[in-house]
Amino acid sequence: MPTLTIGGGQVLTPEMAVETADVLVDTEAGEILAVEEPGELDGDEYLDASGGLVIPGLVNAHTHVAMTLFRGHADDKALDAWLQEDIWPVEAELTAEDVRAGTRLGIAEMIRTGTTAFADMYFFMEEVADVVAESGLRAMLGSGCITVGKDEGEAHEDFERGLAFAREYDGYGDGRVQTMFNPHSLTTVGESFYEEYIPIAREEGIPVHVHANETTNEVEPIVEDHDKRPLAYADDLGVLGEDSFIAHGVHVDDREQALLADTGTAVIHCPASNMKLASGMAPVQSLLDAGVTVGLGTDGAASNNDLDMFDEMRDAAMVGKLATMDASAVPAEAVVEIATQGSADALGFESGRIEAGANADLAVVDLEAEHLTPAHDLVSHLTYAVKGSDVCHTVCDGQVLMEDRELQTMDLDAVTQAASDHAEALIERADA
Ligand SMILES: CSC[C@H]1O[C@@H](n2cnc3c(O)ncnc32)[C@H](O)[C@@H]1O
Ligand SMILES: [Zn+2]
């Protein structure tokens, strides 16, 4: 079996301790074989982690990767106006080639900032799957389904496309692609479509991921029309469950939090997007206290405006405190856990932990920087001080995707040039 040692550095353990250790990886199976004291492990290849901290690859559990094309195109608006006035008109002009170019840009950014897995709900998902396959990253992918603004036939086509993609692409890219079913949200998809399609997804064991309880504008119509809170409505439709995860979960009351915990539904916290669109502050500490699995996501680059999970971690800690007016809420350790183990658990990936048997998905953070000095507490640094640009190596499924900040599977200059060209032409076409 071909092996790789990531050696000479410190390692973050699943218990959030930092040890001086080496990591041995089976590069064919893509699995961590052992974590041992320095010098004990002898792989065929060696990746130098000296002066660095080996961490589990970060898991961006909710994004729309190709929205990198809209970075800076639509700022300073709330969700509904942002989507309806700026984003959806441009998305209507998207081509498969645009999505390929935007996805390449987003994946390059994620690899360069230590993310090794992500969940993506978007359009032209075959393109996204191909880019995941060629880049070496791991992903949970689904084709987004919406019924508002569509006639019955078009809406059915959308849902059939969503199911067909999930069936066909599960296991794609040497098993690094897994698939999910993605009704867009509880208000943009009609009830009859949930009634028709959720049982099919459930029967076929396809995970379900939706935007839910993101803004008060979403909560109010559901309460008015159905006389129940959105997550009670979602539960009655079969949307909640062990392999379901909702994005945002900002406006969730105590009963809904209990429902999430009881059904085993995970929440993906997207603090930057929630702040930028002024959607609100998710009750993250309360969700954690209630026993809900919480993961972390950037959302798309148009509402963030980057895909750097280190930024997201810092935002999660900061807004967690502000939301509760309690500086002890959402502490550094909890943030690192949700960005790694929490997100991986939400997606059902055996990643997010550096231990034997886990996926060999990891990143090495270079600690030799002025903004990381002194090194009193490296878990604190991961949340509050590390920047994505401090990541020197990224490994996914046992393959080195970035070494000394050089991408190994992508041509960064070509990727940025193509994305820039596609973005410009797209905005022009959309006359936006
Ligand atoms: C049907 S594909 C996904 C769809 O979602 C849109 N989107 C991006 N960010 C958000 C958000 O924060 N809430 C709801 N919807 C969002 C994206 O533009 C696509 O249209
Ligand atoms: Zn989203």
Image: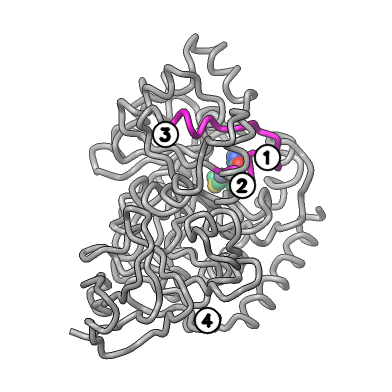
Q: Upstream in the sequence, badge 3 or badge 1?
A: 1
Q: Are marks 2 and 1 in contact (CB under 8 Å)?
A: yes
For image coordinates 42% across by 64% down, the residue present is: 57
Which one is earlier in the sequence, the residue at label 3 or at label 4? 3
Q: Which residue corresponds to the image point at 30% horizontal and 71% vertical from the top-left?
A: 174
Name the residue tied to disc 2: 315
The CA distance from mark 2 to mark 1 is: 9 Å
Residue at the disc numbered 4: 407
Task: Please identify, in this view, whether the residue under mark 4 or under mark 2 is nearer the observer.
Answer: 2
Q: Which residues are magenta?
A: 270-287
Q: Residue furthest left?
A: 1
Circle 3 residues within 10 Å: few <14, some 14–19, many ≥20: some
Choose mark 2 or mark 1, whichever is in front.
2
- Residue 272 in the image: above or below residue 141: above
In reply to whether residue 280 is colored magenta, the answer given is yes
**Rendered image: mark on residue 275:** 1
The amino acid beneath tag 3 is: Leu
Q: Are marks 3 and 1 in contact (CB under 8 Å)?
A: no
Give the secondary structure at mark 3.
helix
SS under mark 1: helix
Mark 4 and mark 2: Cα distance apart in space? 27 Å
